[in-house]
Image: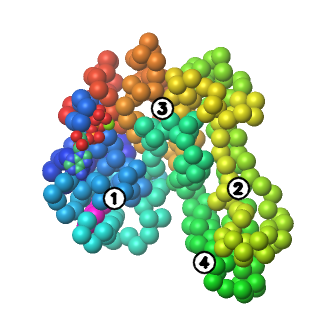
Amino acid sequence: MSLKGIHLTNFRKFSNLKISFNSDAVAIIGGNASGKTTILEAILHLSTGKGTLPANTYVKKGESFFRIKGIVSPATGGPQSEVLVFYDASKREKKILVNKKLISRLAQLIGLMPTISLNMHSFQWVWGPVEWRRKQIDLLLAQANRTYLEALIKHYRVLEQRNKALRTTKDRTLLLTYGQVLFETSEVIRKHRSELIESLNEISKQLLDRLMPDKKTALRLKYHFHNDDDWESKLDREMELGYTLWGAQRDQITWEVDGQDVASFLSRGEGSRLSLATVVAMWIWLSKHRGKVTFLVDDWEAFQDRKYLDAVPSFLLEAKPQNSAIFLASLNKLSGSRWQQVVL
Ligand SMILES: Nc1ncnc2c1ncn2[C@@H]1O[C@H](COP(=O)(O)OP(=O)(O)OP(=O)(O)O)[C@@H](O)[C@H]1O
Ligand SMILES: [Mg+2]
């Protein structure tokens, strides 16, 4: 089991809520506004230190802080850890403790309990901006690979320094030094991203066989990036504009059919199933690298035609890598007894 239980204090609608989990397949059942998304967002905090929304929006109205506590079994095995995320709204300050010890960087939490999320934001795999998809790919790789995480942190830190320097100094040597670091971090980032995109195409091919048989051969997740070998030649223009014109922070990841962005091609239902296949492929990929991965599925009814409603959870259980855990939020009780059903 990846997560033994959670304890929420002043987190969205919950003043005080404790839940114990005793299964790796948990269904959280409840009507609209019962708190399903809230629980999944709490689990996401335990895994990545944040949710999908700004921190202050999670504080219960009228209160000044939230606290999330969870007992987590690390993916690498070993003893359980207690993770505590505390946010003080008046100080706008977040504190994260692992086994009662304050951590100084989010990187110390990332990867302890690897997590993949399927939720209303996942449609952005088809219809969202490229920045969102790049972020998802980065979070996935960061959870799998320390080298990637460190390269990514360094890349964005140096990018910020370089952009600031482009606006404030004419020191070309300094700008070239920063540039050289960015060129190197970009290379590391791109190597990992390229390999990942290739694997995701492989894995999703089989999932699409089942989910969208008539489109599967044409669909391709594409990774676009420029060859930046000539980055030094852009320096004059960059000094004029005040920002960096090249690097891994500008790369694009897009699902395509015959070179065309799927956003303008797929039907609503097809797009939601492609989003589902993408995220499940990420779950399978991460499990291969990390063993135990927690999959958070919100509103699973949204990802399938009405006709196949019942088929999605069985599809998920069949795709479920050994050892991994699934938390699935649903409006309806699920048929079959393979789920621990938490009714809100
Ligand atoms: N900061 C907050 N303080 C108090 N209540 C909040 C806060 N943020 C959200 N809520 C409320 O918490 C309730 C539960 O929200 P949540 O999104 O978890 O519901 P849900 O079970 O996922 O519903 P749905 O099926 O509609 O997706 C909502 O009524 C929401 O307005
Ligand atoms: Mg919800």
Name the N-terminal-most of marks 2 and 4.
4
Q: Is the magenta stretch mostly helix, strand or loop?
A: strand
Q: Which amino acid does label 1 sit on?
A: Ala
Q: What residue type is labelled 4?
A: Lys
Q: Is mark 3 on a helix, strand or loop?
A: loop
Image quadrant containing the N terminus: top left
Classify the position of ligand 2 by quadrant: top left, top right, bottom left or bottom right. Answer: top left
181 or 321: nearer the eye?
Answer: 181
Residue found farthest to the front: 240
Task: Give the label, 1 or 2, closer to the camera.
Answer: 1
- Going 50% across and 44% down the picture, which residue do you hit? 291
Is residue 64 shown above or below 45?
Answer: below
Q: Position of residue 116 (x, y in %)?
A: 47, 43
Name the N-terminal-most of marks 3 and 1.
1
Q: Is mark 2 within 8 Å of ligand 2?
A: no
Taking the magenta stretch, the answer to whether it contains residue 230 is: no
- Going 72% across and 80% down the picture, which residue do you hit? 175
Q: Mark 4 points at which residue?
A: 164
The span shown in magenta is 84-88
